[in-house]
Amino acid sequence: MSLDRRDFLKLSVAGIAIGAFPGLAFASSEIVKKKGQRVVIVGGGFGGATAAKYIRMWSDNKIEVVLVERNAKFISCPMSNTVLGGTRTIDDLTQGYDTLKKKYGIKLVQGEVKAIDSEKQKVMLANGHLSYDRLIIAPGVDFMFEQIEGLSASVADKSIPHAWKAGAQTTLLRKQLEAMPDGGVFAVSIPKAPYRCPPGPYERACQVASYLKNKKPKSKVLILDANPDVTSKKGLFMAAWKELYPGMVEYRPNAAVTKVDVAGKIAKTEFEDVKADVLNVIPPMKAGAVAAMAGVASVDGRWCAVDFLTYESKVHKNVHVIGDAVSAALPKSGHMATSQAKVCAAAIIELMQGQTPDQNPTIVNTCYSMVSDREAMHVANVFRFNAEKQAMVSAEGGGVSAQRSEVEGTLAGYWLKNIMNDVLM
Amino acid sequence: MKMIKQQILAIVCAIGVMLPIAGAQAETDKHARNLSASCAACHGTSGHSVGGTPVLAGMDKELFVAQMQAFKSGARPATVMHQHAKGYTDEEFELLGAFFAAQKR
């Protein structure tokens, strides 16, 4: 990998940053004794857990894999909007990492990464460090709360949840809906693209409307979209709102929320103040904090530029990035994260064996949106590597459902079952 | 003695020719494996579906290729597969078919 002057400067800055905190780089012990070639993976979501499993599986267990994850269990973000609709619970979306440990011999470290020394190739945790030959970071997204006045991580945890990572906030949002009076207003605000799961906010509007239609039919669902138009499956969502939830769902484009009044549950845009009973502000996003620690969030300080043959960072050698954190013309979806993880896993095995990685990666994305308790629709695409553009580009023939259907609703459930099995079992 | 030398030379040459072919075959197999890996979200790891979609592991190669071509042409209606099938070449159908056929059911 060649480094230009700017890259070199960034590397120097990273070096100085670590030099300023010698305690992080020294005086710590190896958490898991290193045996042979090792890949450390930070982040056990769809991308990271898949990379862990496939490196073990495809290297005949020859490469050591240490997976660092802060949560005890995996919770699927895909399909978590159905918790709001009431057809699933968070438990239905939750699974442990036991099989990855037992069946594939992956070493699991539960903890938070504090720093990454990409020069010495070490990941620092509170209780020591992990040395790596190659590092994969799969940090998902973090939220830029500072872009919305009045909003913060603790406000999101307590009263205005984003619920854009499945878990406690999803449950909180569902409870707020349950407590909302009939005739109340649920408002969801969508950040400017790119953000995780392009159709997700529109699906959420459908799931909330599905619940309200049955339980509180006088209520409203208001969508405040920072984008100039519906960013995904537009015709299908518009039809669903009109036909399934007539008079209930209202869509407002170019409505970026810039400020919130937490006590009053008021969202402020350039044009108006919107008072809601349940306020769901999804803040702008960037690559998870680990990307910045590794010094690889080089695109607008938010996303990570990678080589699409290996998912190696364009900034640091031996640091790979997969999933939502990557800067690409690829949707930030769970399926895409697993597809990228497999390309990355195959490439790392080849590189560690002195071989050339696959020069023609071709991957798939299938993404379902549940628009009622039973019906779904999808978007499906094949993406191939284009050597001239050094980018992944959409192949011919991709597209969305002709119409929403119960058949696809059933298939969406099987998608979840199969992908969770592929990632964790 | 000369004959033996010639035979050895012939064998060495043959190995020299075979090795790159074996290497190319291994590369093709890995490419097929990598291609097929993206199908797992709906069809399970290595085609071992755990429900709702056809098990591709162990499927007859000709059947697989014929189905993909039918999805691509529209001869077989589908909810999703016509869109994926259009994104692949005939050569890739062959690679995918060979990979899945080689997986134990």
Image: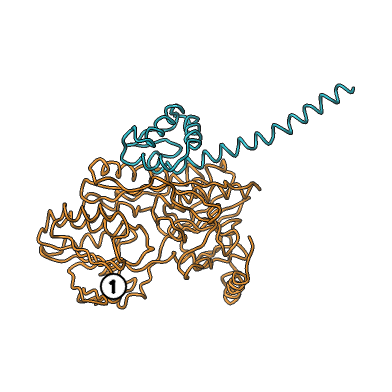
Q: Compared to B16, does A284 lie above or below?
A: below
- Of the chain colours in the picture, the one used for chain B is cyan
> Which corner quadrant holds the N terminus of chain B?
top right
Expressed as whole percent of the image width and height from the top left, the position of residue A311 reads 53, 55
- Which chain does the orange colour mark? A
The answer to which image quadrant residue A60 occupies is: top right
CA neighbours of label 1 inside 10 A, class few (<14), some (14 to 19), many (20+): many
* Secondary structure found at label 1: loop
- At 86% from the left edge and 21% from the top edge, which residue is drawn? B3
Left or right side of A223 for A197: right
Q: Which residue is mark 1?
A: A257
- At 10% from the left edge and 62% from the top edge, which residue is drawn? A182
Expressed as whole percent of the image width and height from the top left, the position of residue A169 reads 29, 62
Disc 1 marks a residue whose amino acid type is Val
The answer to which image quadrant residue B80 occupies is: top left
Left or right side of A282 for A117: right
Chain holding disc 1: A
Expressed as whole percent of the image width and height from the top left, the position of residue A304 reads 49, 63
- At 85% from the left edge and 23% from the top edge, which residue is drawn? B4
